[in-house]
Amino acid sequence: MKKLVVTAAALFAVAGLAACQQPAQKAADAQADAVVAQGDAAADHLNAQADATVAQANADAQTVKADADRQAEALKEQADKTQAAADQRAGEIKDAAKGH
C-alpha cells in the first residue's frame, strides 16, 4: 500500500512537472519562431539592398560605357581628320616638288 501511494505521488509529480514544462516549451517555441522570422526579415532586407546595389552598379556601368563610347567616337573622328589633313599636306608637298 505504501508503495502504491509513493508511486501515485511520483506519477502526480511527473504529471505536474510535465504540465509546467508544456507552457514553457510553447513559450520557447514561440520565441524561437519569432527569432527565425526576424532573421528571415533581416535577410530579405539585406538581399533587397544587394539587388538594389547591383542594379545601381549596372546603371552606372551603362552610363560610363556610353560616355566612353562617345569619347572614343570623337577621338576616332579627330584621328580621321588629322589623317586626312596629313594626307592633303603630303599631297601638296609632292605636288609642289613636281612643279620645280
Image (cartoon, helix red, strand yellow):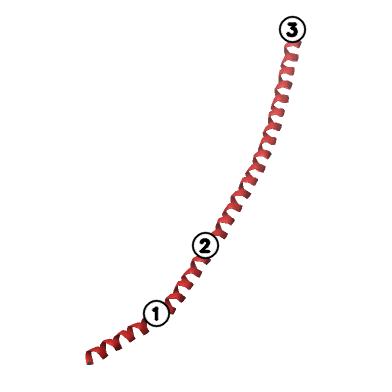
First-in-chain label (3 vs 1): 1
First-in-chain label (3 vs 2): 2
First-in-chain label (2 vs 1): 1
Marks 2 and 1 sit apart, C-alpha to C-alpha, by 28 Å
**Residue 94 in the image, given as x and y percentages of width and height:** 72, 11
Is residue 88 positioned above or below 70 on the image?
A: above
What amino acid does circle 2 point to? Asp
Q: Which one is in front, 20 or 39?
A: 20
Q: Residue at x 48, y 72 (%)?
A: 30
Disc 3 secondary structure class: helix
What amino acid does circle 1 point to? Gln
- Are circles 2 and 1 on residues that touch, CB within 8 Å? no
Is residue 55 shown left or right of residue 30?
Answer: right
Disc 2 secondary structure class: helix
Give the number of the disc on residue 40: 2
What amino acid does circle 3 point to? Lys
Is residue 14 shown left or right of residue 88?
Answer: left
